Image (cartoon, rainbow, N blue to C red):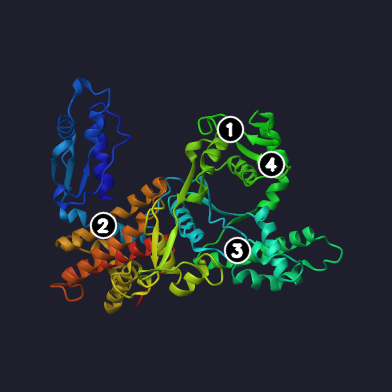
């Protein structure tokens, strides 16, 4: 690609001045007047202590420019304020990269820079005592798209889910279900779980737990809770499948608990546990837990929720993976320093352990806030939203914002078939591309597809064409960037901008009725390249790319 050629020549110029070129980079300026590509590396070099004579960024930029060899692909190179170096590419050269997209097809943007590396990504891991609620649902597309992006840059990815099928919450669920099933007596107001789902679930409990003759009330409640979370787990997994997600590994907390004695014993031998107030505490005293301890075994001998995390994450850290990622709701922020501390004592590089926290989602219908579900009692379920808006809108709209921001999910907006609805706007662009190519008739079978040199992309000179081309060429670099900063919401921004550039191209540049056959061929090639790129983007997002709408 052209960007790589510029980058290579820039690196040579920087190295010839005695600087290291490892941090050499290019970006595409938002304002076209600043060139097709730009770099502020002269500013970065000016900050180095090793720079002789305290040269300014502009002086360093001038030195780089003197060493930058003359090329046949640049129209000009300029130095702007602050030492920015702006590169203006010859239009006929810029358009040649369209052919690279046509050659790459579904592999456009794919790279092998992390080939041989492995990553494991845990996400959703919902509360097992009720239906999958919309708040937890936000972590689904986030973790799934991040996994897809990591795979696109060469990682082998393990998508994993933790089922917290034990603890007080399961016992409380069992009490609710046993009461509704008529197996025990209780004060209904004292029951923890409300909503129609608990009553519906209780109808299935008797057949699940079998004969209860001779069992104590506590044993009946325990069996009811165990049966309940198993039924709810199957329901949650179905909802997850409907979101378009498939897990490679599901870990049950009840199984982790069996391994807890051995794992905790090893930590105790290493001096990372202490006894106090009748309980057992995780107390490593490292940079992540300087003055706070975390209970792993309560004074009554039962394990805490964090104990399961200790066992599970110890397995993760010892599994020889290059990257471990947790995607959690923001209400678990207190676990972050504890898990980081565990990574350190497990000998795992904390820099390779990433925790992404996402904020909550508020469901609206127009201006009205939807406060609760009749079925769930106090929250909105994923199934209800999926049934109303579908998988594509569900995924795309939940990915529109940074995980750190709260979302207002407007049910009315996502059902609009207009440019106000971002997923419709993007999918309509793909359908429009498909329609153009369909109308082109036998174009797709012409010889240019086998002999790309026959396409004269130099015919593409209008600003709307060039803007679209430059946006397409961002895609490979964006994917690499997202694989390191994990800001996968930027992929929806990219898709919307691509749709916008394409719609503007369509409105100002006739394709099938262009002035001459060469221009028709060039514009059709640009349509194909746009369709390839948008389809690849939507595939990573887990959103369908319709041929017609």
**Residue 534 seen from this side:** yes
* Residue drawn at x 51%, y 42% as measured from the top left: 336
Q: CA distance from mark 4 to mark 2?
A: 56 Å
- The location of residue 284, given as percent across then percent down, is 59, 31
10 Å crowding of disc 3: few (<14), some (14-19), many (20+): many
> Does 251 sit above or below residue 518?
above
10 Å crowding of disc 2: few (<14), some (14-19), many (20+): some
Quadrant of the image occupied by residue 63: top left
Circles 2 and 3: CB atoms closer than 8 Å: no
10 Å crowding of disc 4: few (<14), some (14-19), many (20+): some
Q: CA distance from mark 4 to mark 1?
A: 22 Å
- Residue that label 4 marks: 298
* Residue drawn at x 26%, y 47% as measured from the top left: 3
Q: CA distance from mark 4 to mark 3?
A: 26 Å
**Numbered label attached to residue 345:** 1
10 Å crowding of disc 1: few (<14), some (14-19), many (20+): some
**Numbered label attached to residue 130:** 3
Choose the circle earlier in sequence order: 2 or 1: 1
Choose the circle earlier in sequence order: 4 or 2: 4
* Residue drawn at x 17%, y 68% as measured from the top left: 519
> Does 342 sit above or below residue 236?
above
Question: In the picture provided, is 250 more to the left or to the right than 259?
Answer: left
Q: CA distance from mark 2 to mark 3?
A: 44 Å
- The location of residue 397, given as percent across then percent down, is 39, 64
- Residue that label 2 marks: 471
Choose the circle earlier in sequence order: 4 or 3: 3
């Amino acid at each position: 690609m052209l960007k790589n050629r510029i980058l290579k020549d820039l690196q040579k110029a920087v190295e010839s001045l005695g600087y290291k070129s490892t941090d050499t980079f290019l970006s595409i300026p938002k304002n076209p007047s600043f060139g097709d590509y730009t770099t502020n590396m002269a500013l970065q070099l000016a900050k180095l202590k090793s720079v002789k004579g305290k040269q300014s960024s502009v002086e360093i930029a001038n030195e780089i420019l003197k060493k930058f060899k003359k090329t046949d692909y640049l129209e000009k190179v300029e130095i702007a304020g602050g030492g920015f170096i702006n590169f203006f590419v010859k239009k006929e050269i810029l358009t040649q990269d369209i052919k690279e997209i046509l050659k790459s097809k579904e592999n456009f943007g794919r790279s092998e820079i992390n080939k041989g590396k492995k990553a494991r990504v845990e996400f959703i891991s919902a509360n097992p005592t009720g239906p999958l609620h919309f708040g937890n649902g936000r972590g689904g597309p986030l973790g799934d798209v991040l996994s897809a992006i990591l795979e696109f840059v060469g990682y082998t990815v393990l998508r994993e889910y933790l089922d917290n099928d034990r603890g007080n919450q399961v016992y409380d669920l069992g009490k609710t279900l046993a009461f509704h099933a008529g197996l025990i007596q209780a004060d209904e107001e004292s029951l923890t779980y409300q909503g129609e789902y608990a009553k519906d679930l209780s109808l299935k409990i008797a057949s699940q737990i079998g004969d209860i003759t001779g069992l104590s009330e506590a044993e009946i409640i325990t069996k009811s809770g165990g049966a309940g979370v198993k039924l709810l787990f199957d329901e949650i997994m179905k909802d997850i499948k409907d979101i378009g997600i498939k897990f490679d590994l599901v870990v049950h907390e009840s199984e982790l608990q069996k391994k807890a004695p051995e794992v905790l014993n090893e930590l105790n031998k290493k001096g990372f546990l202490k006894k106090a107030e009748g309980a057992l505490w995780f107390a490593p005293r490292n940079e992540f837990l300087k003055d706070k301890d975390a209970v792993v075994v309560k004074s009554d001998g039962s394990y805490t929720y964090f104990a399961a995390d200790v066992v599970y994450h110890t397995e993760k850290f010892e599994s020889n993976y290059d990257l471990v990622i947790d995607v959690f709701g923001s209400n678990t922020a207190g676990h972050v320093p504890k898990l980081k501390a565990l990574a350190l004592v497990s000998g795992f590089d904390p820099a390779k352990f990433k925790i992404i926290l996402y904020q909550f989602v508020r469901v609206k219908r127009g201006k009205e806030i939807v406060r609760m579900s009749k079925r769930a009692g106090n929250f909105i379920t994923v199934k209800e939203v999926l049934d109303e808006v579908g998988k594509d809108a569900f995924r795309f709209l939940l990915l529109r914002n940074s995980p750190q921001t709260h979302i207002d999910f407007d049910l009315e907006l996502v059902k609009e078939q207009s440019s106000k609805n971002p997923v419709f706007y993007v999918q309509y662009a793909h359908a429009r591309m498909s329609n153009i190519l369909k109308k082109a008739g036998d174009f797709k079978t012409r010889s240019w597809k086998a002999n790309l040199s026959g396409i004269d992309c130099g015919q593409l000179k209008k600003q709307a064409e060039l803007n679209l081309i430059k946006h397409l060429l961002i895609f490979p670099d964006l994917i690499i960037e997202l694989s390191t900063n994990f800001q996968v919401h930027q992929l929806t921004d990219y898709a919307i901008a691509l749709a916008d550039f394409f719609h503007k191209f369509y409105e100002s540049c006739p394709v099938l009725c262009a002035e001459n056959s060469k221009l028709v061929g060039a514009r059709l090639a640009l349509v194909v390249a746009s369709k390839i790129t948008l389809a690849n983007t939507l595939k990573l997002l887990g959103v369908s790319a319709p041929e017609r709408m």
